[in-house]
Amino acid sequence: DKNFERQLKMLKEFGFRGVEVNIAKPDQIDANDLRQYFSDFNLRFTMFASGLAAKTFDLSLSNEDPGIRARSVQKCIDFIDFAEKFDAGVIVGFLKGGIARDAHHAGKLFTDSLSRIAPHALQKSVPVLIEATNRYESSVAKSLEETVDLVKEYQNSFIRILPDTFHMNIEEADQSAALRKYIKYYDSIHISDNNRYFPGLGAINFAEIIRFLRGLQYQGGIAIEGNIKKSFIDDLRKSMDYLIPLLS
């Protein structure tokens, strides 16, 4: 796809090191071919984003239907096997499940599903990142505190949390305080503006967030995420014009 190639070339020009990729059917992908394809642009496949697959196959780790949960657990195990080929992680966001009638019960169902996934993540040394997503998208793991409460019982270094500034802008009273308190639970952060566009196209003060992360001596990854406002290339250029001075 020529348009995708142009996007990857732009990522290379800006010095990006990796990409998080949504793939609906990873079992139909040749891992060696995909690895080589990204390496041509000096990029690594860093994260398997499970959202597209979850939507395509109606997956939910907190669904009341035990059949759907079992199928979702198996798919997540398959995602781990796929991610292992790239030394990548697996992001669990939409896959957690949507709005439930009983949030507490949904949380219990989710932790039961995660208990079946966690041993495989440990065996394969593949990080599984539980993304804290806002209350309008899921009843499970909304704030960083809730997400940590769900994962800490496993004492498994490969079950991590994933903060996202868009969701935090809704769920956290103090983003900096939450990031500081739970820093040992995350190694990657999504930065997305309050309107879900790329950083710099909304109202979040990313200068403050980046200064704060530097103050914490944060050594993990930072990934840009967002909806497209005008075009990928135009939006990314504007976002990087805003971010590069903050990151340099």
Image (spheres, rainbow, N blue to C red):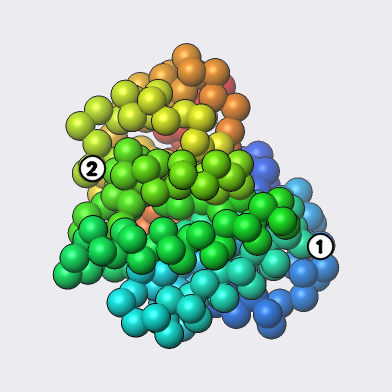
Amino acid tagged 2: Glu
Q: Is residue 197 visible?
A: no
The Cα–Cα distance between marks 1 and 2, rounded to whole angstroms, is 39 Å
Check the image and report above or below for 203 versus 65. above
The mark found on residue 171 in the picture is 2
Check the image and report above or below for 60 versus 96. below
In front here: 73 or 98? 73
Amino acid tagged 1: Gln
In the image, what residue occupies the spot 75% across and 49% down? Answer: 42
Crowd class of label 1 (few under 14; some 14 to 19; many from 20; radius 10 Å): few
| The C terminus, quarter of image | top right
Percent of width and height locating residue 56: 45, 81
Please give left or right for residue 171 compared with residue 38 in the image: left
Q: Nearer the viewer, mark 1 or mark 2?
A: 2
Helix, strand or loop under label 2? helix
In front here: 66 or 38? 66
Q: Is residue 71 visible?
A: yes
In the image, what residue occupies the spot 41% across and 69% down? Answer: 61
Percent of width and height locating residue 101: 17, 70
| The N terminus, quarter of image | bottom right
**Farthest top residue?**
215
Residue receiving disc 1: 36
Percent of width and height locating residue 48: 59, 61
First in sequence: mark 1 vs mark 2: 1
